[in-house]
Image (spheres, rainbow, N blue to C red):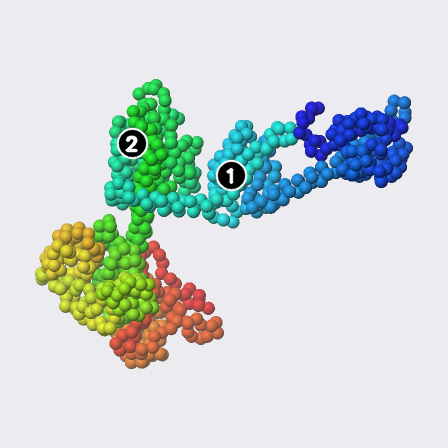
Amino acid sequence: MWQSSRPGSIYDYIKVASFSLGPDGRIDQWSERAEQMLGIPARHALGKDPVEAFVPREFRETGRRKVSEILDGREWTGLVPYRRETDGAVDGLAEIYVMPAENEDGERGAVCLVVDVRALRGIETDLAAAQAVFGQSPMGFTLFGTDLKLLRVNERFATVFGGPPSKYRGGTPHDFLPRPEAERMTVALRRVLETGEPVSELQLVGHVPGEEDRRRWSISLYRLHGASGRPIGVAALASDVTGRRRAEREAANARRNLALLNEAGARIGNSLDLETTARTLLDVAVPQFCDLASVDLYQGLLAGDEEQPGMSDGSAELRRVAFASAVSDVPLPGAPEEDPVTVGAVHRYPFNSPCAAALRTAQAQIVPGRESDEGPELGAVVHSTLAVPMVARDTVVGLVRFSRTKGSEPFGERDTALAVELAARAAVCIDNARLYRREHERALILQRSLLPPGDPEAAGLDIACRYLPGTTATEVGGDWFDVIELPGHRTALVVGDVMGRGLRAAVAMGELRTAVRTLALLDLEPAEVLGALDEIARGLGDSGDRGAMARTARSRSGAPAGGPQNRSARTADLSEVYLATCVYAVYDPITRVCTFANAGHLPPVLVEEGEEALLLDVPPGMPLGVGGEPFEEIEVEVPDGALLALYTDGLVESRHHPLDEGLQAFRRALSDADRPLEDVCDHVLSALDTSHGEDDIALLMARVHGLPKDAVGDWSLAPEPRSVARARELARDQLNDWGLQALVDTTELLVSELVTNALRHGHGEIRLRLLLDRTLVCEVWDADLAQPRRRRARDTDEGGRGLQLVGLLSERWGSRRTPRGKTVWYELALPDGDAAPVDPAEALLSLF
């Protein structure tokens, strides 16, 4: 389609002119552009020799020769200097393209096109400069066409998002931005293209390849025009403001902390409940500051989740947690296009609304009120609203809306500052409550995961236990109890109390409890367990500063404070965390003997049938972590039906009465111990003052019923080869008596292996013992102290597979020291009718 080019076309930039030569070699046509470019009017050029007209004198001979060649029909292109005044100096350099032509009479002439070389060089320089600016810019630079598709991107943009610049040609914002952000940018591009009004600092959030964290960019958009003035696209200049945005939020956080001097500071933040804090904020604001107000909090934060996508741009879900009004109880209306939101409802603000803008920018926004008087809705009387984001620790947690009705003064700058302070105070308190709840839940999960299950089982014992945390503020502590199954159907009962409370005490409790379990499985004596545990506690609490406690004592007595002193205090505080009391008891259901060792803990309580509760006289010992004193142990014979109680000081100690009174009340509560064990636990907790909230409470009770005589088989064997066959015979007969024919083959095989090992590697009399309870346990005793060691036999070895076979066929096995040697044992699960026992023949074949 033909069209006229308005002034300012590309031909004006490159300065193209034309003229023609007649058959006589003189100028017969002279364009206006030639007049403008060469500075020679048409009246001075027409009819003249072009060489004489604008070629300097020293080049005229060459010029005449070229003109003759052109008139002979030859094309010519070359550079020709020209001057603007007659006999003047060389003024410029033109590139001339001469094309031979004929007139209507067949006479030869020429058409000449003239281009100013200086203009061409200028355009080349401008293009090179534009290319350098575009290509070397440290900021992302893109060009969008009128169809809002990318025409070009610079290297910086391609480096950030990956790939060569050509990869993005023809793309759209959806190709490198998340969908919500891409839609925002598309709307902005269309508005700039249509209106011509630039957009500055459009905030966009997205991800770049290879990074998990979101990045924030500030985008400036402006429309581009062609030489004729028509729009040809939109340019976008993007700078990464992630770091700057973070710094701005940190500065805003510091300013918000100064707002604690606000007069409402005395009321806001007295509770760690999110909804209570929000309601307190509104109680302060209404009606003293505004007529209506509401608080919206992000649904993700209320649910305990981490920051969800959409929170930074205001598009995530919010929940209305509080509303207050001095004029009506109806929900707070929003903009004309919004519906009222009731308390407890989950909603979203429209993206283009001022409330969403406040959430996105973390800046207070003024929301215009409704001017319509149609209908009785409350929105018709609200004429000024402030939407204030609640920002705490660089995180927008919600939005507060303060509204004033007609008749009240509209909000001003000072009102906005006060509203920001009120919201900031509440935001910090709400975020504190959120962080406390999150950390508190984590600590509880940690602590409860370290406690044994609710109904632990043990051979010869009925177990009941209770753990009561303190109040909401002291719920996490260091009390613990444990029930550990030991070889030979013995059971270890443990109750301990780490000094202090909170997460650090819970962590220390977990470390000490794990150490107790590890030491118990080594089958050490109770006093040895506490001695090793004391060493572990001292090692955990020692940070390398041996003189910390002494230096801390000197500093507390008046020494000047300083760096080393402060470090000593911190070291002492850490050491105190690993101070703990503990009572460790091992019950043997065969001998009915319970062995106790105590590390500074309250004494256990024993209740025999028909007798009063008795505090056992167990040597108290020093708390764990103190060191310096050995631990003692005592043995107590516990008859069947007796009740054994272990507990922590939170059960019997309180600021309202002495410890002796608490112990006496505990003994009285145990006087009626004939009822079921769970009922006894409940009765003790209800009879004592367990709601004082000063400390955690751990209570572990065990009712004793030892293994009956017919559940134990015990024999002594001579240290001679025929004892192996004798041991198999005894084991077979005992299992037949117990009705465990399914375990006879496996038991005979394993008993034979253990007795054979005792003959080969041990000395002295051999003892064989079978124990039947929830599982079958077989023990072989000898007088040698060397512990058996399992090894992997080679294919060519004739022996060395005995313990491998024991490990394959048994549930578990091990060995322990005895006062006169060692005991090697294994344990078999009782047949349940569903699962068939392991075939000994198959197990033997698997070793080869």
Instruction: Describe residue 483's horizontal placement relative to residue 234 as left or right.
Output: left
Neighbourhood count class around disc 1 (C-alpha, 10 Å): few under 14, some 14–19, many 20 upward? many
User: Residue at 59% across / 41% down in the picture?
Assistant: 153
Q: CA distance from mark 2 to mark 1?
A: 37 Å
Which percent across, then down, holds residue 174?
Answer: 53, 37
* Residue at the image point whose x is 30% and y is 72% from the top: 816
SS under mark 2:
loop
Tell me the element at label 1: strand
Residue 653 vs 587, above or below: the answer is: above
Q: Position of residue 515 (x, y in %)?
A: 30, 65
Residue bearing mark 1: 219
Question: Residue 427: x and y, percent?
Answer: 33, 42
Residue sitting nearer the eye, 680 or 226? 226
Amino acid bearing label 1: Ile
418, above or below 470, in the image = above
Please identify the quarter of the rendering in which residue 447 is found. Answer: bottom left
Viewer-closest of 416 and 351? 416
- Residue 497 rendering spot, x and y as whole percentages: 23, 61
Judge whether residue 45 can be spotted in this image: yes
- The quarter in which the N terminus is drawn is top right
Q: Residue furthest front?
A: 87
Residue that carries the numbered disc 2 in the rendered image: 290
Find residue 693 and name its label: none
Q: Residue at x 76, y 31 (%)?
A: 39
Q: With respect to residue 389, does 754 lie above or below? A: below
Q: Above or below — where is 123 with respect to 774? A: above
